[in-house]
């Protein structure tokens, strides 16, 4: 992900990849994946911009992508002013532009929040995520796979599969996509 704005303000998500590597990234995802936290308030508009590249680093132009807005946990709810958002399944489809970029606009529809984190550290945000409404988002190149177990997403090759065990064990040959995992946490 190359950019996030919340309520019109550019934000830099808090990177908790080091802990994510130990807790779940190396088990389920690629070692190059990142895990980020971003807070928002009830009713906030969120814009996410993603730069999509191929394995050689080239921009993928005209590529269909799907943003899964309720991946792994979905206590936050969303609407969108843009075409391509399907509220019934939480998927948001788009197509990359001439530079390989795609932007999604979402509006949080929750009206209540939990605890205020004491700081914006990864530890405090992680603890807040345990009690506040939150959602993890992930970008899928292509369309989501069907019939996958809870916590898995994929395109026609089901790029995320359980027990990948990377980098310490064998890498599942179906895993072909790295992405950011973005957790949005509702705060007062």
Image (spheres, grey):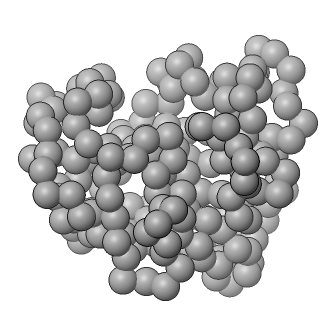
Residue displayed at 66% across by 68% down: 65
x and y percentages locating residue 97 in the rendered image: 64, 82
Residue displayed at 67% across by 37% down: 149
Task: Note whether 134 is above or below 62 in the view shown.
Answer: above
Q: Residue 60's image quarter?
A: bottom right
Q: Nearer the viewer, residue 72 or 59?
A: 72
Residue displayed at 81% across by 16% down: 169
x and y percentages locating residue 12 in the rendered image: 35, 50
Q: Nearer the viewer, residue 113 or 148?
A: 148
Q: Can residue 5 be seen in this view?
A: no
x and y percentages locating residue 133 in the rendered image: 26, 42
Task: Note whether 151 is above or below 142 in the view shown.
Answer: above
Q: Is residue 86 visible?
A: yes
Q: In the shown orientation, is residue 104 left or right of residue 108?
A: right
Q: In the shown orientation, is residue 33 left or right of residue 173?
A: left
Q: Residue 101's image quarter?
A: bottom right
């Amino acid at each position: 992900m190359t950019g996030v704005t919340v309520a019109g303000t550019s934000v830099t998500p808090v990177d908790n990849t080091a802990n994510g590597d130990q807790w779940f990234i190396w088990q389920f995802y690629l070692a190059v994946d990142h895990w980020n936290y971003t807070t928002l308030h009830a009713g906030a508009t969120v814009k996410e911009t993603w730069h999509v590249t191929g394995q050689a680093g080239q921009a993928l132009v005209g590529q269909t992508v799907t943003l899964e807005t309720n991946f792994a946990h979905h206590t936050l709810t969303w609407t969108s002013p843009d075409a391509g958002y399907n509220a019934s399944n939480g998927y948001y489809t788009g197509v990359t532009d001439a530079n390989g970029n795609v932007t999604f606009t979402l509006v949080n529809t929750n009206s209540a929040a939990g605890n205020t984190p004491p700081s914006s550290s990864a530890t405090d945000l992680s603890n807040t995520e345990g009690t506040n409404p939150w959602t993890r988002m992930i970008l899928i190149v292509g369309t989501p796979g069907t019939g996958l177990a809870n916590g898995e997403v994929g395109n026609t090759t089901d790029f995320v599969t359980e027990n990948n065990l990377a980098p310490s064990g064998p890498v599942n040959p179906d895993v072909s996509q790295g992405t950011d995992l973005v957790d949005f946490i509702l705060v007062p």
